[in-house]
Image (tube, rainbow, N blue to C red):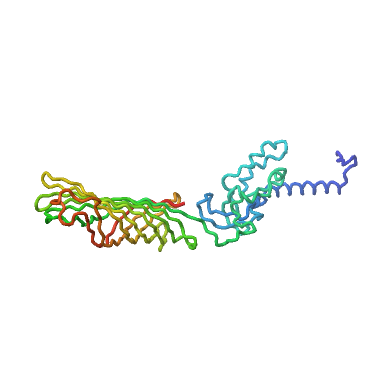
Amino acid sequence: MPTAYILGEPLTSIGKLTLIILVINLSILSAREIKPETFFGVSQVFKTQIYESPDLKSKVIGYLEKGEKIKVHPKHFKEAEIRKKIMDQKIDLYEEKQGFYQIITDRGLKGYIERAHIHLIYRDFRDQHYHFEINPEKDLTDYRLNEPLSSNYPLAKKVSYRLALQARLGPGFVDNYVFPKLIKKERFSNRYGAALTFLKNAAFDFEDRFYFGGVIKFLTFRNEFTLVDDAEYLEDHLGVTIGPALYYESLRLKGVTIGHGLELNFIYRLVDIEGRSGNLREDRKFDGYIIEPALVNQVSFQNKKKNLDFNIGMRISARPKYQLKSSKPSDLDDLWGDRDGFYELEAKVYQTYFMGIQVYY
């Protein structure tokens, strides 16, 4: 029978037994390396989320702290066959950090973690190519603040601005010049216009409910009259407004807000009247200034992804009694009567409806 030798010496029965035990131990170690539970990774960010499915929009079912060990599904270790440094040129394959790893926690919680947040442990030369020293500026999961803190923390707030463009519509003004004869026929048109509002959030309000700024508006409309003597008058009205504004959001719902505002309107009002009677014709201009307060109520439908709102609402204005004046006297007294040179407007509370868009930044 042939004899086995180790280092030139024949093996005894004890030596044979030792060799058998050594082979068994090596087999056990090899089997242990390929068991699924040996495939694991380490969280390399401050706090990473565990998702219910491989989708960033899916439910978050847990968290991992930085440095926490986690079991990873063996299918993610398909590069395990690369064992030699001579194939180091393929190391870029391991740096691919897109997608998810399927994991299971010590408590049996199954889920998915972003690949960029986990460092796989291979137990070979490849572990030298991964570094646990993550740049804090790139760790988006780390919400901790650097010290020293700013002097106004935690009361610092962001300055916000809003710009709104609105189309305006309102019922006609039942106003007219005091004509020398009775009116036989009249037609009052609706008022049309636009408004531009610029607002900034108030420094004292940390809920971003108070906004103040300014508003620019204009309105135009036309009224027509026929007198009993068949004289005809065409009135073209124009109002240009500028003034301060204060707004407050009283109610916030999901995607919808309800707000209120106060405006102090400085209005320039112009009326151009064309009078015709037979062969007689004359144009007169009457203008003046007035101050009107206004109450605004609006509903905003928000699109936060685009920083855009759609607004609808109503302005209620209180107009005092006032007069518009003509810069020159009339050449035809029969067309204008005793009130020549003045256009009187009575006190009135009126409403204007609007709709438009608002951007905020």
Taking 79 as reference, is 58 left or right?
A: left
Taking 355 as reference, is 60 left or right?
A: right
Residue 96: image quadrant is top right
Taking 9 as reference, is 62 left or right?
A: left
Q: Measured from the top left, where is residue 82 in percent x and y?
A: 68, 39
88 is higher (above) or lower (below) than 221? above
Is 84 or 229 nearer to us in this picture?
229
Q: Measured from the top left, where is residue 179 in percent x and y?
A: 15, 55
Q: Measured from the top left, where is residue 180 in percent x and y?
A: 13, 55
The quadrant of the image that shows the N terminus is top right
Residue, x 77% and y 49% (percent of image)?
25
Q: Measured from the top left, where is residue 22 in percent x and y?
A: 80, 47
Which residue sits furthest right?
9
Which residue sits furthest left?
229
Numbered circles on residues, count: 0
Taking 333 as reference, is 244 left or right?
A: right
